[in-house]
Each structure stands twice: as C-alpha cells, then as structure tokens.
Image (tube, helix red, strand yellow):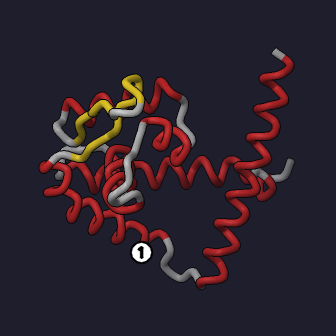
Amino acid sequence: MEQQDDLGKYVMTLSHQLRRRIDAGMASIGITGMQARVLHFILKEREGKEVFQRDIEMEFNLRRPSATGILHLMEQNGLILRESVAHDARLKKLVPTEKAVCVSEQVDRQLAEIEKDLCQGLKRDDKISFRGLCLQMEENLAVTEKKEEKEW
C-alpha cells in the first residue's frame, strides 16, 4: 500500500491533531474537548428535547463504558444532572446545569474558531464531499465490525 492510499493514517493524524487543539482550547474553561462536544450537542443540537446516554453513544459512536465515563465526569464537574423520567424509571435524562449554560457561549466560540481554522481554504463543495466520504468510511467500518462480531 502506497502512503497516499493510507487514508486511515490521515484520518487518525487529523483526529489526534484536532483533539489536541480542542482540548487546549477548552482547558481554560476546565473541560475536555469531548465534554465540550457533548455539552454542545445537549444544549444546541437537541435544544428543548430530552437527551439520554444512548443519544450520546449514537451521536459520537461511543461504546457504553466510554459514554458512561464522560458523562460521569461531566456530572462530577457540575455540568449535567441525571434525572429519572416518569415513563421509565430505568432511564435517566441528561439535564444541563446552570454552570453548563454559563460556559456554553465560550464552548461555542471556541468550537467555531477551531472549525474556521480547520476549514480555511475549503469550498462548500469540498466540505460536502468530505462529509460524504467520512460517512461512507464510517459505514464501511460498521459493516465489517458487524461481520467480525458474528464470527466471534
């Protein structure tokens, strides 16, 4: 395999670089980049809707133990509360705290700045193509993961 064909390496390298940049930007707020993304998802993308751990798992392609760890830290840091819901005592909805609302503007500003830097020089069509390619690669890996799970 030629180096330019090793797309996994490029995706991984970009992912690590982006994670470092987001973590550094969020350090002044006292949260991790992943906590920032989850907070943004709860407050902006799902605004006014109930959000549960399974929503976080699906949105960020996380396994249950990883999502549990992130949400536990967010709860410890006073960013979210887990509240029971009337229709199913086993379910706990994720409720942002006042502290979360207070830091959300800083989080949004940092994420927007990083996104601007990340996409500098890219045209709208480039972004659309990139998103489509990423979704296709994600689906490719999901299919092979399911095959491997059946073989075990």
Depth check, front residue: 119 or 112: 112
Residue 64 image offset from top left, x and y in percent = 50, 27
Q: Is residue 71 above or below residue 4?
A: above
Residue 101 image offset from top left, x and y in percent = 18, 56
Q: Is residue 30 above or below residue 149?
A: below
Tally of numbered tags: 1
Could one spot residue 21 in this view of the protein? Answer: no
Kind of element beneath mark 1: helix
Q: Residue at x 73, y 63 (%)?
A: 133
Residue 61 image offset from top left, x and y in percent = 57, 41
With 96 as the anchor, is 16 left or right in this view?
Answer: right
Q: Is residue 96 above or below residue 104?
A: above
Determine which quarter of the picture holds residue 71: top left
Q: Residue at x 79, y 47 (%)?
A: 140
Which residue reaches farthest front? 87
Disc 1: which residue? 116
Q: Residue at x 59, y 84 (%)?
A: 123
Depth check, front residue: 114 or 97: 97
Determine which quarter of the picture holds residue 4: bottom right
Could one spot residue 117 in this view of the protein? Answer: yes
Determine which quarter of the picture holds residue 116: bottom left
Depth check, front residue: 134 or 65: 65
Considering the image in quadrants, where does the C terminus appear? top right
Q: Residue at x 69, y 57 (%)?
A: 135
Which residue type carries mark 1?
Lys
Residue 68 image offset from top left, x and y in percent = 40, 27
Depth check, front residue: 86 or 6: 86
